Amino acid sequence: MGRWLRKSVGVDEDLLSWVPADRPKFTWLGAVVLSSAASSGFSLWAGLSNFSGLSGWLQLIIVLVWAVTSFNLECWLVASTAVGGLRRNLVRIGSSIVYGIVQAFFVSEMLLLKIFEPAIREQADTIGMTHHPLSLIDSEEALQALRSGNFTVDATIWLFRCLIFVTLMLPILVRLIGGGSAYDRLARLRMEHAERLLKQSMHVDTDVNQEVGRLTVQLLETEERLQGTEAKLQETERALANSERGRYAP
């Protein structure tokens, strides 16, 4: 299980074997990613069970697909976030923040509708929504009516949304706040070494291509000279043949 969690966040076990002290850190990082995806799946289940009217098995399949998709996306974000400078990871961090905001809004909204369900039903009856069960739009309207003029409810909802956002951003925050570990330094050194080898290989290939081009030009020039020499020899042979015929002519 631990190996699978570490592999999910992009850890190379062969490289990690050189620094076994970092193994628990990346195991817990994978566990945080898994927990975040599980909370996202649970929130979708809460929404489907309240408003979809779908069968239990179909709800389960949709929730599993959503949770696996969220898990894979978060694993990619964590694995592609290299420790060692905010400027270098600015695009990835920005993508993570956008993902966290969208996910936090979706997750928190589904959970809030579930948490405030009794109050939402009472509010719906108060504003004249007597039909049951309530649709998602009706529940949202009742929740907005419940929030209006009630600072406590409004503050609680925003605090809950912020909590969900921080929870969903935990994998990235743990990756960045944790700082560079020995494994990260080894991974960075290996990457830099691979880049140097690639540049050297490209430089060698460039030199070889230039040499091949130079030799090709020389070969073409030599062929042109040989063709010119051959043409001159043919002209000389024809001139000699004409001279011989003129000498022996009566």
Image (tube, rainbow, N blue to C red):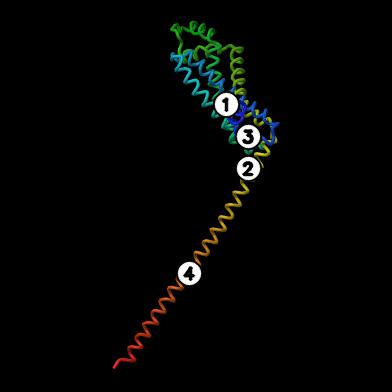
In the figure, residue 12 lies in which quadrant?
Answer: top right
Q: Position of residue 33 (x, y in %)?
A: 59, 26
Which part of the image, by quadrant, shows the C terminus? bottom left
Determine whether 111 is above or below 33 in the image.
above
Q: Position of residue 87 (x, y in %)?
A: 64, 38
Amino acid tagged 2: Met
Check residue 100 in the rendering and tell me which mark sits there, or answer none: 1
- Disc 2 crowd rating (10 Å Cα; few below 14, some 14-19, many 20+) is few
Circle nearer the N terminus (2, 1): 1
Q: Split into 4 quadrants, where in the image is the N terminus?
A: top right
Secondary structure at numbered mark 4: helix
Give the label, 4 or 3, closer to the camera. Answer: 3
Checking the image for residue 191, the label placed there is 2
Gap in Å between the C-alphas at discs 2 and 4? Answer: 45 Å
Circle 1/circle 3 CB separation < 8 Å: no
Q: CA distance from mark 2 to mark 1?
A: 29 Å
The reply to whether discs 2 and 4 touch (Cβ–Cβ < 8 Å) is: no
Residue wearing tag 4 = 221
Callout 3 secondary element: helix
| Alpha carbon distance from label 1 to label 3 | 29 Å
Mark 2 and mark 1 residues within 8 Å of each other at the beta carbon: no
Q: Which mark is residue 13?
A: 3
Residue drawn at x 44%, y 14% is 55
- Residue shown at 56% from the left, 32% from the top: 76
Where is residue 233 drawn, in percent x and y?
41, 79
Instruction: Using residue 248 as the reference point, say whether residue 54 is left or right of it.
Output: right
Cα separation between marks 1 and 4:
65 Å
